[in-house]
Image (cartoon, rainbow, N blue to C red):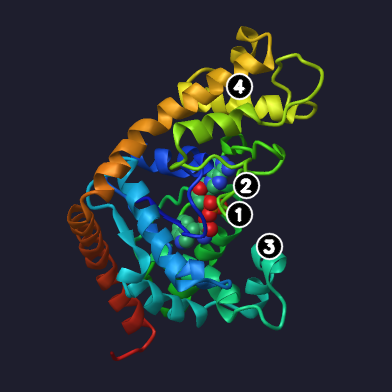
Amino acid sequence: MTAVSGITPSGRLSLGNYLGALRRFAEDDGEPGFYFVADLHAMTTGHDPGQLGRLTRETALLLLASGMPEGSVFIQSAVPAHAQLAYLLECTAYIGELSRMVQYKQKGGRPMTRASLFTYPCLMAADILLYGATRVPVGGDQDQHVELARDLAVRFNATYGQTFIVPELARAQAAGRVGDLQTPTAKMNKSEPDQACGVLRMLDSPDVLRRKVMRAVTDSDGEVRHDGDTKPGVTNLLEILGACTGMEPVAAAAHYSSYGDLKKDTADAVVALLEPVQQRYRALADDPKRVDELLEAGRQRAAGFAAPRLARAMSAAGLMG
Ligand code: AMP
Ligand code: TRP
């Protein structure tokens, strides 16, 4: 069971990223996976180079601070095999199937859309296939891309001979989604503007976290009840409280008779959960040499795994290089 997952540095990481991705990666037992900052993916839409560099470093530090196994964290662009295999997979994919990708249909399709947004699922397939991943923990919006990675692996193997392991499609659990505090029916999205007060950032100070939770949208009937259809705001707070403390969200509702108390406990739980991660983040930020060493160890391990698979794919396709 090899796990691979990437986080695109397209915004400051949110509590949703921590609960839905980073914490899960860190809890993975068994052999260490491959977890990377997908900086190449952040170039598929207009980007600012300085900002990309800063967010890449911050995201890498947060991966390390969240307790990933040693040697499992690296930066995608530091391992050129990703971009190299992506080209081979662009030569395997059809424009018909790439045109059907929901994310492309939503974000692209205009004359000035970057070509890389269209081919991006091939890069993501390369990220996965390079490491022989069997498990790809991602959110539901990425299922279609993982499915394409499967299709490309099967097609490449059938055309050129057995080269890639076909990854499993591990569907995300619906309940794993943290909602935005201001628009609880939408996911808490790191790519919202920095000042968006519905998004709890992993590096927000305790004061800011508390303020955002206390201002969360609820409703006017005043009853604390878990009911996603009619009470999305309160339900989202119960889910966050549950995810942070291990309490069962439906049962937790019975402990509260006012929204104020629920918000206060939820805020405390979020702060308590993130504080140790923030402390480790600060320790790493104060020791850039140590961070460089950790990322270099991750790069070396990833490059070592990726090289033989890339070589096999190139030679199977008839490339002599
Ligand atoms: P994204 O921020 O959409 O690029 O997603 C990066 C990773 O974080 C993916 O594995 C997502 O499933 C996870 N993630 C992002 N936002 C949330 C959220 N609001 N709730 C749960 N998981 C999330
Ligand atoms: N595209 C993913 C996202 O936006 C991030 C990602 C890039 C990824 N490469 C990956 C996830 C490989 C899993 C495996 O969330």
All told, the count of numbered labels is 4
Give the residue type that dot 1 points to.
Pro
Q: Which mark is residue 196?
A: 2
Name the residue beneath numbered marker 1. Answer: 193
Tell which of 126 and 263 is nearer to you. 263
Q: Earlier in the sequence, mark 4 or mark 1?
A: 1
Which residue type does callout 4 highlight?
A: Lys
Q: Are marks 1 and 2 in contact (CB under 8 Å)?
A: yes
Foreground tag (2 vs 3): 2
Per the rendering, the mark at residue 103 is: none
The tag earlier along the polypeptide, 1 or 3, is: 3
Residue at which label 4 appears: 263
Gap between marks 2 and 3 measured at Cα: 25 Å
Where is 55 relative to 248, above or below?
below
How much space separates mark 4 and mark 2, taking CA atoms? 18 Å
Q: Position of residue 206 (x, y in %)?
A: 46, 31
